[in-house]
Amino acid sequence: MIKRGLISGILLLLIVSVEAYFSGDWSHIYYICGTMGLVSIGLALAYFIDSLILGNKGNFSSKKETRKIGRIDQSKGFLIMAIPNLIAALVYIVI
């Protein structure tokens, strides 16, 4: 899950960079990558809080014992996905 998050983050950054290069408007990196980075951090926080609150209880119809482990791994994946996008937005702000 962590490798998939990193690959997704880098792929999004590359797509936005190519689009910004051809359009000539480099502020797209700030707006799109920054927004996706913040959304990814929000999702990571939501999945982490979900794993803390619900634990491995699941819902009424299913009791999946590995639910907490899965949610924490998804949270790590979203957090790793946010890192390249937020770094790109920060580089745009600095330069």
Image: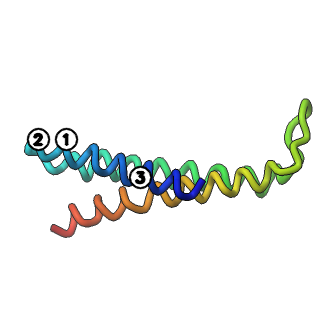
The residue lying toward the viewer, choosing from 74 and 52, is 74
Marks 3 and 2, the one that precedes in the sequence? 3
In the rendered structure, which amino acid carries the disc numbered 3? Gly
In this rendering, the answer to whether 87 lies above or below 23 is below
Q: Residue at x 18, y 49 (%)?
A: 27
Dividing the picture into quadrants, the one containing residue 95 is: bottom left
Q: CA distance from mark 3 to mark 1?
A: 15 Å
The residue lying toward the viewer, choosing from 46 and 75, is 75
Q: Residue at x 83, y 51 (%)?
A: 66
Whether residue 52 sits left or right of residue 19 in the image: it is right
Q: Secondary structure at mark 3?
A: helix
Where residue 52 appears, as percent x and y from the top left, is 77, 57
Q: Which mark is residue 33?
A: none
In the rendered structure, which amino acid carries the disc numbered 1? Glu
Dividing the picture into quadrants, the one containing residue 88 is: bottom left
Q: Residue furthest left?
A: 24
Q: Are marks 2 and 1 in contact (CB under 8 Å)?
A: yes
Q: Which mark is residue 19?
A: 1
Q: Residue furthest top?
A: 61
Q: Secondary structure at mark 2?
A: helix
Q: CA distance from mark 2 to mark 1?
A: 5 Å
In this rendering, the answer to whether 9 lies above or below 92 is above
Q: CA distance from mark 3 to mark 2?
A: 20 Å
Q: Which mark is residue 22?
A: 2
Determine crowd level at label 2: few under 14, some 14-19, many 20+ residues with C-alpha closer than 10 A.
few
Q: Secondary structure at mark 1?
A: helix
In the rendered structure, which amino acid carries the disc numbered 2? Phe
Q: Which residue is mark 3?
A: 9
